[in-house]
Image (spheres, rainbow, N blue to C red):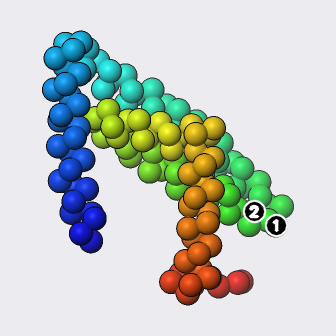
Amino acid sequence: MRWLILALLLIPAAEIGVFIWLGSMIGPWWVVFFILFTGIAGVAIAKRQGTDTWNRARLMISQGQPPGEAMIDGICIFIGSILLFSPGFISDILGIVLVLPFTRRPIKWWVYHFLKRKIENGTIIHRKW
C-alpha cells in the first residue's frame, strides 16, 4: 500500500515536470498536440490489439486449449490502454510498451513467471477444473 501512495504522488509530479520541461523546449501547443496525438493513436492501436487478442482467446477456447497467453496479453493491453488514455508522456510511453506486441513480449514473460511464483508459493490459488 505504501508503494501505491508513493506512486500516486510521484507519477503526477513527474508528468507535470516533463510537461514543463518539454513545453519550454518545443512550446506549449506542441505539447498539447503530442498528448492528444499519442492518446488517439495509442487507443486505436490498443483497440486493434485487443480485438486480435480476444479473437485468439476465443479460438483457443473453441479448440479446448486454455487461453493463458492471450489472457496475459489482454491484461497488458488493458493496462496499456488506460495509461495511453491518461494525459502524460511517461504514461504514454509505458502504455505504448504494453500495447505493442514486440515490446509487450518481455513484460508478458515477467508477468507469467511472477504469477507462476505466486501460485507455487500458495499466494494465488490455482484450481483445476
The residue shown at (39%, 27%) is 38
- Residue 26 seen from this side: yes
Q: Where 106 sits versus 38, above or below?
A: below
Q: Residues within 10 Å of mark 2 (few under 14, many from 20)?
A: few
In the picture as drawn, the residue positioned furthest to the right comes out as 63
Q: Residue 91, located in which quarter of the rendered image?
A: top left
Q: Residue 43, located in which quarter of the rendered image?
A: top left
Image quarter in which the C terminus is found: bottom right
Pointer 2 with pointer 1, Cβ within 8 A: yes
The residue indicated by pointer 1 is 64
Q: Residues within 10 Å of mark 1 (few under 14, many from 20)?
A: few
The residue shown at (50%, 39%) is 97
Q: Position of residue 24 (x, y in %)?
A: 16, 17
Label 1 amino acid?
Gly
- Dot 2: what SS? helix
Give the CA separation, mark 2 to mark 1: 5 Å
The residue shown at (60%, 49%) is 106
Q: Residue 35, located in which quarter of the rendered image?
A: top left
Q: Position of residue 51 (x, y in %)?
A: 61, 43
Using the image, tell me which numbered label, if any, was put on residue 53. none
For residue 42, side relative to residue 3 (left or right): right
Toward the viewer: 117 or 37?
117
Q: Position of residue 90 (x, y in %)?
A: 33, 37
For residue 57, side relative to residue 103 (left or right): right
Q: Position of residue 19 (x, y in %)?
A: 20, 28
The residue indicated by pointer 2 is 61
Label 2 amino acid?
Ile
The residue shown at (16%, 26%) is 20
Image quarter in which the N terminus is found: bottom left
